[in-house]
Image: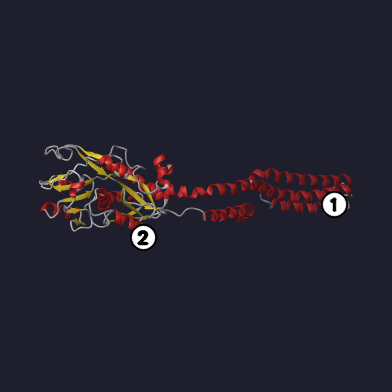
C-alpha cells in the first residue's frame, strides 16, 4: 500500500517542529558533554608489565598467577623475569625499558631516592635463610668471619638484606670470601664445599629451600637474637619454622627454627591507573589471603611492612574493599561508569534548567500557532461588530473561509487538539452569526 502523501507531509512537519523546539537543547547538551569529557580520566590500559625475579624464586610463579587472574578482566599482564628486588626498583624508575609494577622485598626501597614509587601493600613473609655446612658450625652471624659466603647476585633482595646484617656484625664484605651468587648456583657451591654458607630470601616452598633442608651435611641457622634485629631493622619480622613442618616423616626441621623475614611487597609507579590498583589488589587477595607457613589467614595483603608510602587508592581498598561497581559489574563497565561520574554534576546543572525551560517553550510554540489564528478571527469579529456586516458581507465570509482552510492545515499534538478544535468552532460561530444577520436583514444570501 502506497504511503499517503498527506501523512508524509504531516510527519515531516512534526519532525521540523520537533527540531525547532528540542534542537537547541540537544545541541547545548552535546556541547556540554564534549566540554565535560575533557576532564574525564582516561580509560585504564589493557596491558601491564610486572617485574618478578628469577624463574627459581617465588616471585615469578606468583606473577604467572596474577597474569591468569587479570586476564579474566581483559588485562594482559607481561611477566618479566629479573635479577630481583633491586633491579625491579630500577625498572620501576626507568622511563624507557621499565615495568609498571613489581614485587619488591621489604627493606630494599628508599622513598627519598624513589619519590615516584608507591606501595600497594605487602603480600607475605619472605624469610631469610642461612644455610651452612654442618662441619662449619654457625650459631650467630658473627661466626661467619673469615668464612666463604654466598650473599646473592647484584640486584637481588637477598644481597641487600644480607649486607645490612653482616654490617651489624662488623663482617667485611670487601674480601675474596664473599661470593655474588644465589639460587641453584649457590646450592651447588654449598653442596660441593666451594662455600661455607649461603643466604637466601625465599618462600619455604621454593625448590632451593626444600632441597637444602633435605640435604645431609647442610644445616639451617636459627636466629636466636631475632628480636634484636627486628628492633634495629623495622622492615624485619621474627617468624618460626615449626619442628617437623617440612617433612613429618623425616622430622624436618628437627627443632623449631627462628627466622628473620622481610615482607614481599607490591610496588608501582605513582601514575598507575587507579582502576588497575583495585584489580591488582583483588588478584593479591585471591592469591595470598589464605596465608601460609608463616602467615595467618586474612593477614595478607596488608598495608603494614611497606617501605614506600601507600598509594591513596590502596588505602581506600584496604579500608573499604573493592569499589562498589566492580563487585557487581564487569571490569570494563565498572571503570566506564566510574570515569563518567564526573560528568553527572555539570550535566545535571545544565539539564535541570533545560528541563524547566523546554516544556514551557514547547507549549508556547504549539499554542502560538493556534493563537495566531485567534488574532485573525478576533480582528474580523471586531470589524463586524463595529461596521454594518452587510456592506462587506462576502469579504468577511471569504476571510473566515480562508482562515478555516488554513487552520485545517495546522498540526498540533493530541494534547492540544482541544484548543485547535475550539478555534474551528469559534470560526464557525462567527460565520454563523454573520449569515444569520444577513438572513434576518436581506432574507438570505
In the picture of the structure, the residue carrying the numbered disc 2 is 94
Residue 103 placed where, x, y %? Answer: 31, 51
CA gap, disc 2 to disc 1?
97 Å
Image quadrant occupied by the N terminus: bottom right
Is residue 118 visible in the rendered image? The answer is yes
Name the secondary structure under disc 1: helix
Residue extending furthest front?
Answer: 170
In the picture of the structure, the residue carrying the numbered disc 1 is 393
Left or right: residue 139 versus residue 271 is: left
Name the secondary structure under disc 2: loop
Residue 238 placed where, x, y %? Answer: 26, 40
Q: Residue at x 20, y 58 (%)?
A: 175
Mark 2 vs 1, N-terminal side: 2
Left or right: residue 149 versus residue 216 is: right
Please identify, in this view, whether the residue under mark 2 or under mark 1 is nearer the observer: 2
Q: Report the front residue among 356 and 81.
A: 81
Q: Residues within 10 Å of mark 1 (few under 14, many from 20)?
A: some
What colour-coding does the image apply? secondary structure
Residue 281 placed where, x, y %? Answer: 36, 46
Residue 433, quarter of picture: top right
Amino acid at each position: 500500500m502506497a504511503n499517503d502523501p498527506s501523512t508524509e507531509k504531516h510527519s515531516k512537519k512534526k519532525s521540523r517542529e520537533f527540531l525547532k523546539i528540542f534542537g537547541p537543547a540537544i545541541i547545548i547538551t552535546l556541547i556540554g558533554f564534549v566540554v565535560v569529557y575533557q576532564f574525564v580520566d582516561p580509560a585504564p590500559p589493557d596491558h601491564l608489565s610486572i617485574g618478578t625475579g628469577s624463574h627459581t624464586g617465588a616471585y615469578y610463579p606468583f606473577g604467572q598467577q596474577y597474569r591468569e587472574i587479570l586476564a579474566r578482566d581483559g588485562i594482559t599482564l607481561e611477566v618479566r623475569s629479573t635479577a630481583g628486588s633491586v633491579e625491579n626498583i630500577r625498572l620501576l624508575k626507568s622511563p624507557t625499558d621499565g615495568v609498571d609494577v613489581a614485587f619488591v622485598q621489604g627493606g630494599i626501597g628508599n622513598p627519598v631516592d624513589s619519590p615516584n614509587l608507591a606501595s600497594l601493600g605487602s603480600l607475605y613473609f619472605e624469610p631469610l635463610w642461612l644455610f651452612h655446612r654442618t662441619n662449619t658450625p654457625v650459631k650467630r652471624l658473627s661466626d661467619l668471619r673469615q668464612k666463604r659466603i654466598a650473599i646473592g647476585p647484584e640486584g637481588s633482595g637477598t644481597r641487600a638484606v644480607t649486607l645490612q646484617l653482616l654490617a651489624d656484625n662488623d663482617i667485611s664484605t670487601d674480601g675474596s670470601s664473599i661470593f655474588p651468587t644465589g639460587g641453584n648456583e649457590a646450592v651447588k657451591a654449598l653442596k660441593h664445599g666451594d662455600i661455607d654458607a649461603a643466604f637466601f630470601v625465599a618462600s619455604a616452598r621454593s625448590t632451593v629451600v626444600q632441597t637444602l633442608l633435605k640435604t645431609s651435611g647442610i644445616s639451617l641457622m636459627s636466629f636466636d637474637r631475632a628480636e634484636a634485629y627486628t628492633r634495629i631493622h623495622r622492615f624485619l619480622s621474627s617468624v618460626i619454622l615449626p619442628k617437623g613442618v617440612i617433612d613429618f616423616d623425616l622430622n624436618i626441621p628437627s627443632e623449631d627454627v627462628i627466622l628473620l623475614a622481610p615482607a614481599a611487597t607490591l610496588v608501582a609507579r605513582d601514575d598507575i591507573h587507579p582502576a588497575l590498583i583495585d584489580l591488582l589488589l583483588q588478584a593479591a587477595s585471591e592469591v595470598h589471603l589464605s596465608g601460609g607457613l608463616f602467615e595467618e589467614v586474612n593477614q595478607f595483603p596488608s598495608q603494614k611492612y611497606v617501605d614506600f608510602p601507600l598509594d591513596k587508592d590502596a588505602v581506600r581498598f584496604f579500608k573499604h574493599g573493592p569499589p562498589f561497581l566492580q563487585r557487581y559489574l564487569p571490569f570494563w563497565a565498572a571503570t566506564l561508569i566510574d570515569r563518567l561520574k564526573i560528568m553527572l554534576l555539570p550535566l545535571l546543572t545544565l539539564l535541570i534548567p533545560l528541563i524547566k525551560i523546554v516544556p514551557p517553550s514547547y507549549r508556547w510554540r504549539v499554542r502560538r500557532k493556534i493563537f495566531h489564528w485567534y488574532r485573525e478571527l478576533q480582528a474580523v469579529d471586531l470589524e463586524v461588530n463595529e461596521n454594518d456586516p452587510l456592506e462587506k458581507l462576502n469579504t468577511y465570509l471569504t476571510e473566515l473561509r480562508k482562515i478555516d482552510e488554513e487552520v485545517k492545515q495546522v498540526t498540533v499534538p493530541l494534547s492540544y487538539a482541544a484548543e485547535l478544535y475550539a478555534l474551528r468552532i469559534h470560526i464557525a460561530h462567527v460565520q454563523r452569526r454573520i449569515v444569520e444577520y444577513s438572513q434576518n436583514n436581506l432574507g438570505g444570501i
